[in-house]
Amino acid sequence: MKVFFNKLKNCRKSYSITYIILSIFYLITLGFFLYSLSRLHNIENVLRLIVTIIMAAWLFIYLIVSPIKLFTKKNKSFIAISIITGILIPILIIASLLVNYFFKNFDFTKDYLTYTTNLVTLTDTEFNSSSKIGMISNENDLEGYKLAKKLYERDKMSNEIVSYEDYYEMLADLYSKKIDAIFITSNYTIIFSSEETYQDIANQTKVIAEYSEKLENQDLTLKSNKKLSEPFTVLLMGVDSEIDGLDVNQAFNGDTLMMITFNPKTLTATMFSMPRDMYVPIACRNNNLAKVNSSAAYGSGCVINTLQNITGIDIDYYVKMNFKGVVDLVNAVGGITINVETPNYAYNHGHNCNGKFCEQNSNRKWGKDTIYLDPGIQTLNGEQALAYARCRALYTESDIARNRHQQEIIEAVAQKFSTIKSLDGFQQILNAISKNMDTNITTDQMLSFYEVAKDMLFKNDSDELISIQKTYLEYYDLPVYLPGSDTVTSALGYYDASLEAIKKAMRVNLELESAEMPKTISISVNENYESKIIGKGLTDDSRVETMPSFTNKTVTEATSWGASHNIPVYIEYVDYTSEYYNPDVSPGLIANQSVHRGTFLTNISSLTIYINSGTAPENPVIPEEPDSNENEIPDIDIPGSPTPE
């Protein structure tokens, strides 16, 4: 080595310095490059090996061959080798930076989120030390219990705590003033405003204290070891926030829940949207029945477990997407082509649409910011696509129509990916979704999708990049009585036959069962072919029924209904002295009933109906309680009605 450096000193000084500097820089950049290259697990393994050998060989050439050329006075050869080395150094640096940029921007996992609990009262409630506070009893509930306890201790409160297992029960008691305040997630106005009872919750309540902590993302406990190169299921959850970004709170509104199965071998996807008002067992509420969107109040884990129980299909991954990100994503792919459905109604939340489609913009503003669209096929930009994805008030099917539009938008965006061939276009997409997306898909798992993505983008010459199977869950209106709030909510029930068809399609796509080949095929040249929508038109006798209202109806209508449902109907006649008397109902008609409208029939053993026997006087004199039964109204035998036991 000493001899080597002595020879190097005897060479021209500028050459010697060039050799030393380039050797050091090349060695450092090559190490950085090889480390970056090693992170690309199972991506172009042969190419990566070839590049590694070439770059390592060139290191040998420069360290050993170039000084020999220098010592033998072959300066031109030394200069040529040095120039090549000088060119390779920035190439290695750029390549390393691109790989690390990829890893940085392809990591959509939010490792830490800011969680916040609020102490909330009704606007007309004066909170003091004697006020009762509602708190969730589940000790694993981060915002409803853990942070609530810290807020309680921080502010040195001495208030009485009333424990609840359920947010909806706690909120109902707040509204009925059985308690004075509640601890609840800071997203509560977004989560609960979709319920009829709490539509104006933002104006009806006020926050009097809050406590926040930046903690590890609680949803990251939901992990999967499945590679994206094998069939998988992902749950897309929409977060309808006015804030650009997705780095706060696990609780969210569950208005958009879409299960997508994808088979990378066939490039086939099934999309199943669960309507937000579908009445189902909620996994984290002891399987008590409620609207499926209510599961979102308890975090992503509750939503996933609920849908897994309903479908019987494991959900491998989740993607939580802020609707704000839709604007940037659609713009990044250059807009999408959508056939805008003709509205059924002229007004959207009281706003006159003048015969067009209209909706608020991404900041929920009307007026000059209103998004107007003519019905028909057209190219939508980001703001227009988001408005179309959000809107349900203009359509008879309401949330069902909105789910259909969201599926169309996702399909259009997916097909537009095939047009992205440049690195710049790819970078714009990454920038559009990185801050507005959270997922449990790791970077390594995303890399496992590389070969599939490459085939999709560069080997598929057809316009249809992915074959998408659409689904439609047949539903029916299901008014449900909520005892806690003494209200009837408008929910939806589903037909088992429709759900079973959708479940089968998803299982077939996941290769969990084989598809059944049709025995006969009928084709008419006079009919336009339309792709089959799985589950559509399939109904059966699985319909769940709730108690109807018999107010203002006849005895015969009630008793006939009871006979057809095998429910005994008992009859009582009441006058104005009874609590069951209804002054708005004519004599002889049903004034009231013992079972509230919207109660599930499975919970009913009998029904008593109360018949108005007369009108109330202007100044009624309420008689004293009689000592005997002689003044009671005798029972009247109604043909076809059962006799009380």
Image (spheres, grey):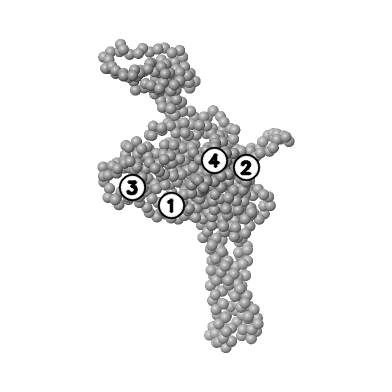
Q: Secondary structure at mark 1?
A: loop
Looking at this rendering, what residue extends furthest in the bottom direction? 10
Q: Name the residue carrying label 4.
A: 353
User: Which SS class for mark 2?
Assistant: strand
Query: Which amino acid type is shown beneath numbered disc 3?
Result: Ile
Circle on res. 208: 3
Q: Residue at x 63, y 81 (%)?
A: 78
Looking at this view, is 2 or 548 the one in front? 548
Mark 1 vs 4: CB contact within 8 A:
no
Residue flagged by tag 1: what amino acid is it?
Val
Residues at marks 3 and 4, CA–CA distance in whole angstroms: 38 Å
Residue drawn at point x = 40 percent, y = 12 percent: 636
Task: Report the amino acid beneath label 4.
Answer: Cys
Which of labels 3 and 4 is toward the front? Answer: 4
The amino acid type, in three-letter code, at marker 2 is Gly
- Residue 248 is marked as 1
**Where, quadrant-wise, is the N terminus in this rendering?**
bottom right
Measured Cα–Cα span from mark 3 to mark 1: 20 Å
User: Considering only order in the chain, which callout, 3 or 2, is on the residue closer to the N terminus?
Assistant: 3
Q: Is residue 516 above or below residue 216?
A: above
Q: How many marks?
A: 4
Residue bearing the label numbered 2: 376
Marks 2 and 3: which is nearer the front? 2
Marks 2 and 3, how far apart at CA: 48 Å
